[in-house]
Structure formats: structure tokens, C-alpha cells
Amino acid sequence: MIQSIDSIQSTVDELQIDPDVIQKQVDQVLNDSIYWFPIRHHSLTAARYLEKLILTRKPKLILIEGPYESNPLIPYIVDRDSKPPIAIYSSYRDDYNQFGLAGIQTVSPDIPARFSCWFPFLSYSPEYVALKTAHKIKADSVFIDLPHYALIKKYSPNTDEQIETEEPEPDYKPVQQSNDEGLIISSHFYQKFTQLAGFKSWDETWDSLFEVYQSKRNSEDFRRDMAFFCACVRATTDMKRIIADGILEREAFMLKTIEQEIQKRALSNNDVIVVCGGFHIFADRHNIVDIPQFPEGTVYTTVVPYSFFRISELSGYSAGNRAPQYYQLLWEQDQGTKPNEAGIQYIINVFSHGRKQGESLSSADAISVTQTSQFLANLRGRNVPVLDDLHDALMTCCCKGNPLEQGIHLQKAIALVDIGNKIGRVTSKLTKLPVLSNFYDLLEELELQDIHHKDARMNLDLDKRKDKDTKRSIFLHRLRFLQVPIGEIIDANRTGILTGTLFKEKWRLKWSPKIEEALIEINLYGDSIETAALHKFKEELSKDSSLAQATCQKLIQAIDMDFPDIVMQVEEICGVAIDTDSHFASLSHALTSLLVLNQYALFRKLPHERLESLILRCFDRACFAIPNTANVSEESQKEVIFALLGLAEALQLSGRGNVPELDRNLFLQHLRQAALISVSPFMCGAFWGMLTELRELPIEELTSLISAYAKEQPDKMVQAGDFLDGLMSVCRTSIMVGAPHLIDAIDALLTTAEWDAFLIMLPKMRSAFERLHQKQRDTIAEIVAKKFGLIDSKPLTSLVASLGTEAMIARIDGQLAEIMKKWSFDE
């Protein structure tokens, strides 16, 4: 700690900060008739001193930096049945487009802009401790911070009018109530101080200066030390950043609210404590900034369960806590007054999880970590280890190699113990969010409540031709689209176009605490599952609009979620995507989706004339795109083959059921064109194989293409294996029918091939035959046996070799490996 104090003094000197001016500012605030208490969000040390202070002073009013619009929720926050982590959730919808962001932030001018804000509480958050202690002594407590939606800026296309900051403005999206941490980190004082003190992060800086327990420090010492630090920070923070973050407006509102709340109760200033971030205790009392008016629109606030993970920095929470469970452990050890005991327990917990991860951790390792962490703390000027010391000691003593490789399991264990998995609870006295109520009502209505009440895993076999199963399917698809983790679809037959299996689905459902978290997140989209899914779907509709595959998949989603009114709009977008997309695989996948939708339309007796037009256009466009795949890279070949098979399947369905008549000749014409221009043996084999499978090319002509490789030079001859592999990736039935011709062609090729060429072709030929089913391979083996007079021998598919033969095979494998090193297979 002495080292840190010296660094503060050195920083003041180096930045030429006048310590007398800073001290005067500090004295002026601390000697004010209103008692100002500076805090850091989620600081257990600040919470401990604050609780003692409130119990000692017994104020009549405690004013807390927190969302003003949430004051009616305080009784539910302090209710005995509410258990942190919990959070205030506040949302705002600009129904009248006052900020001009409809169609800018949202995808359409008819969709209003939406904003949300979270204000989390841990059991050791100073704000929560202040609320609970105020309730205990029967003092009033009031949130005094400006609502988040009052700081929304009106859209202006003229960027010159925007205030420039050192960092770009964030996108409009859910945010936290405040980000004072960012202001502190950006200050010149903090940056120079950490450089001199050798701290690696703001968390380490805070823990070293304030979080480490000091038996001789009391509430006043803590208050004065933090005030001095924050005064230095504020004095060296760029005013442009302060203005851009809306700090002045927030502070003006807080000062006005403090005055109003005191006057409302006719209290003396001495009966009041103000609890706020240390940056704000130096708010300009003569601030003449206009306080923004609260905009009209829909505002909703509530208290919801939260989790350690969501409050951690890992989840992206900007004013978060890097290790909620670790600091909870400290809090439980007499509110952080026994850090050594907490540190030992922390090491034990890491070791327990590490062993489960497969780490070999001994008692001697635990002793070594404990001693090393204390040594590191002393070396860094701390009297007890902080989390950084514990982390470094664990990796130093227990990681036997590269931390990113050998230390990966240990790091996972550390993360688990740091963050934890605790989820809070909110009293049942508080009405749930409308979307949550709708969710639970639907669970009851659809008889799915067992997954919640019994916390049981449920397997559902749905037949969407039944009314109840249709409703269940729609509900589950909407939740899936909204990313509510209630379960997964494990089987949905999209290929049974002419059979009843098209309407069958299998779901595996399981309750998770994350379900409510996800539902809270989607509250901004609507008050029910249906409206939330519909509004989110409209937003998603604008994405990937140029890709036929993605757009047609959205059409299936619209049907699955039962949004018939939007289907026509999606069909129009699909038409544009089909006409502009030139990617063969995308068009083929889109065609499959359209065929599925066509069958749905037939079953539900929906108009399908537009779908038929889309199917014909998509099929034609896919055919025109086939030549573009003639020489695709090896990485893309699998996708192209899958798409070719899909197009061929569609052609087989042509004219059957309600599938329109597809242009077979167009498909064959472009297949042949692709085969003729392809210089890729694999793709060439696939195209000729597809033509053979469709009875357009006689098997004799196909096998003559294989035989032709026997007359080529070795560098061309070895490509026969790739040709055969591509052929068998699409052609099965014709091969089995013409198997004797195929075997004759391969025999001629192998007879001609030199030993080295044979060894190079062998892997691809093996890959080709492995594409066949076992019975097909048995049939091929039987034909080979007949050809060479081995029909009475044992089945060739079960080869039993002597030790000498096995040794020879091993030598051949070795020779093959050496030869292949000299060959390049890049085309």
C-alpha cells in the first residue's frame, strides 16, 4: 500500500496537479452539510463501510445513484424473498419517433426505435446494501439518476453537428445505466498512475488501493482516500468525453432531485446521505446545463432475476465485476475482513474444479500457490493477495507448460470459480413482465408445464396435421427463433415432400434458468411471444436479402412460426434474391426450401401459384449456374455435390403432386456443358456420373472415360482416382447396373499403370468405393471374384492375411507415403 501511495504522489507531481487545489475540492465536498459517500459499483469494501456508516449515523433519507424511473420498485428489491443477483430492467419505446431513429436504428420506418437498460445488484453492491440498511432502520431511500432514455440523442445526418470524442459513439442497443469506469480509465491521472505503480488493469488498481482490507482504516479514511483519487481523475479527464457521455445532464438532474427530495420531506441536510460514484461527488453545484425532458413513449420497468455470469465482464457488461463469485466469497468471510481465509478457500475451490477438468493438482501445489500469492502481493506493495496475485500464483505453480495449451483446463477452472453460476430470485409479489406471463400461460395451454414444474426433460413427437401439435410446433419454433433456450429440434424431415413424414417433428425440451433471461431480453420486441417473434422476424428479413438460400429459409421460418400475413412479403423478397443470386449451392438449397413450402401450401390449402413461379425461376437459375461450379476448389466440392443431388431430386419430383413441371433438358444441357469445360477430375467425374444416373449417358460411354485414363501419361493417369471418386459421389444405381463394365475399365487402367502411379491412385479409389453401401461393395466384390475365377473362395470383403503379407502391406504403405510427398495435388 505504501508503494501505491508513493505512486499517487509521483503521479500528482509528474502531471503538475496542484495538490492544494485537489485537497480543497475534497474538503469542500466532505465538509458539506449533506453527507456524500463515494462508491464503486459492486465494491464490497465500499458496501462494508457504507453499512457501518448508515447504522451509526441513522439518516432519515438515503439518496442513491440509480435509475429514477425505478423508485416504485424499491420495496420489491428489499423484499426478504428477493435474493441477488437481481437487476432493474428499464425499457423505452419511441412510439412517436421523436428521435427520428425509426428506419435508421430499425429496419423499417413503421418499427419504432427501442432502448433498454440494466442496473444489476449483487448482495455486496453498495447501492443494494444502502437500500437494505435503509429499510432496516426505516429510512427513506430514493434513486436520483437521470433515466437512460432522457439521454437519447436525436438523429442527425450531419455528422459535423455531433460532438467528437476520443472513442466512437456506441451503436444504439441495450446498455448499462452508467459507465463511470470508462471515464476513470480515460483520465490522464489513472493512466500515468498505473504506469508508475505497475498495475495491469483498473480492477487490480482498485483492489490494491481500496478493496484490500486494512484493519486501521475506517469509513472516514476510505471516504477521504477515494475522494482524493476521484478528484485527481476528474481533473484530468477530457471535458469532451464528459460532455459526450451525458455526465453533466445526469449530474444536474441528480443535484435537482437531491434538493427536491429534501424539501419534500422538510429535512435538514444533516439527515441525508448521498451514495454515488466517486466521479459524481464533485459535480458542479453551479451547473447550468439544461436537464433533458423525459420523452413521450412506452416505458416499462421491473426487477428481474440476474446471474453471476451476466454481471461478469466476460458477458460484456461494461460496468461489471470480473469475478462475482470470488468477491461473494470475500463478502461472506465477515464482509471481506478475512481475505487470507477467503484466498485459501478460493485456491481449494480452483483445485477442486481443476481436478474435475483432468488437472493433476496436489496438496503440495496448494501450499505452493498460497505461499507464492503472498510473496507476489508483498513484492507488489500489498499486505494481502488480491485476485491478480492468486491468478499469477496458480499459473506459476500449477501450469506445467504453455498456459494456452497445457494450462487450458486450469484456466477453465479459474474462470468457473471466479464467475460462478448463481442466479437470483425476485419476490413473487412483483408482477412478471407481460412476455413472461404470456410464456407461462402458453406452457399451461399447450400442456408443456411439466418441463418447468418438474424440471424434467421432455421428448415431443409432433405431427403438424393435428391441431394441438401444430400449436405446439408454432410455439416452439417462435421460441427457437427468439433464441430462448427451451430445447432443440432433433428431427424435422424436410425431404419427405410426397409423404406424411414432412409434417413430423421431434423436439427435446429441458428447463434452464437462462430461459427467463432470454425472455427478458426480447421484451422490447413485444408483450407476447407472437408479437416479439413477428417484430424480430421483420428485422431479420432485411438481412441476407441477396442470398436465395437464406431468404427462402426465412420463408420456411415464416410458415413454421405461422405468420401467413408476412409470407407474401417474404415471397417478393425471395423473387428478387433468386433473380440476383448466381451461387449454385445457394440456389439449390433455396429450391429445396421452396419445394417444402409448396407442400405446406397444399396441406393448408393456401394459394401456391406464386410459389410455383418461384420454384420454376429458382430451378432455371440453378441450372444456368451449374457451369460456374466446373472447377471449384476442393473445399467447395462437397457443398456442390450436395446441391447437385438436391437439384436432381427436385427433377425426379417434377410434375408429381403439386410440384410444377421442371425443365429436364435445361438441367441436362448445363450438366454436359460443365462436364466438357471442367479440368477438375473429381468434378468431371461427378458431372458425367450425374448424366449417367439420369439415363442421359450410357454406362458404356462412362466406363470408356475411365478406360481412357489408361492411355494417358502417368501425371494424367493418376487423376483417374479423383474421377472415380467424383463419379461415385453422385452415381450409385447406374454403377451397380453396369458394374461389369466398370470393373473391366478399372482392370484395364490398373493393368497399364506403373507401380508408383497405382500407389498414388489407390487412396482416391478406396475413397470412391467407400461411398458405396456395404451390400453394394459386396456385390462389386462378388463380380470381381467371378471375373478372376475366385467365386468359390471366401468372401473378399473379409481379408485374412498372413504375417508375411501384413509386413508387405506395411512396406507398401511406407513407399506410398514417400512417393506422395513428391506430388502436388493442387490444381
Image (spheres, helix red, strand yellow):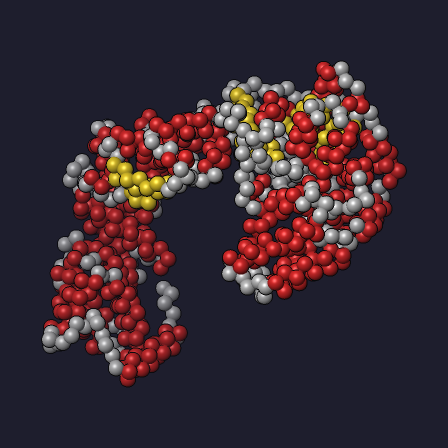
The quadrant in which the C terminus is found is bottom left
User: In the image as oriented, which residue stretches furthest toward the right?
Assistant: 20
Q: Position of residue 786 (x, y in %)?
A: 11, 73
The image shows a total of numbered marks equal to 0
- The answer to whether one can see residue 574 in this image is no
Q: Quadrant of residue 230?
A: top right
Residue plotted at (25% across, 82% down): 802
Q: Position of residue 178 (x, y in %)?
A: 64, 33
Q: Position of residue 784 (x, y in %)?
A: 15, 71
> 659 or 795: which is nearer to us?
795
Q: Is residue 429 above or below residue 713?
A: above
> 438 or 146: which is nearer to us?
438
Residue plotted at (27% across, 79% down): 754
- Residue 496 vs residue 443: left or right? left
> 675 or 515: which is nearer to us?
515
Residue plotted at (77% across, 31% down): 56
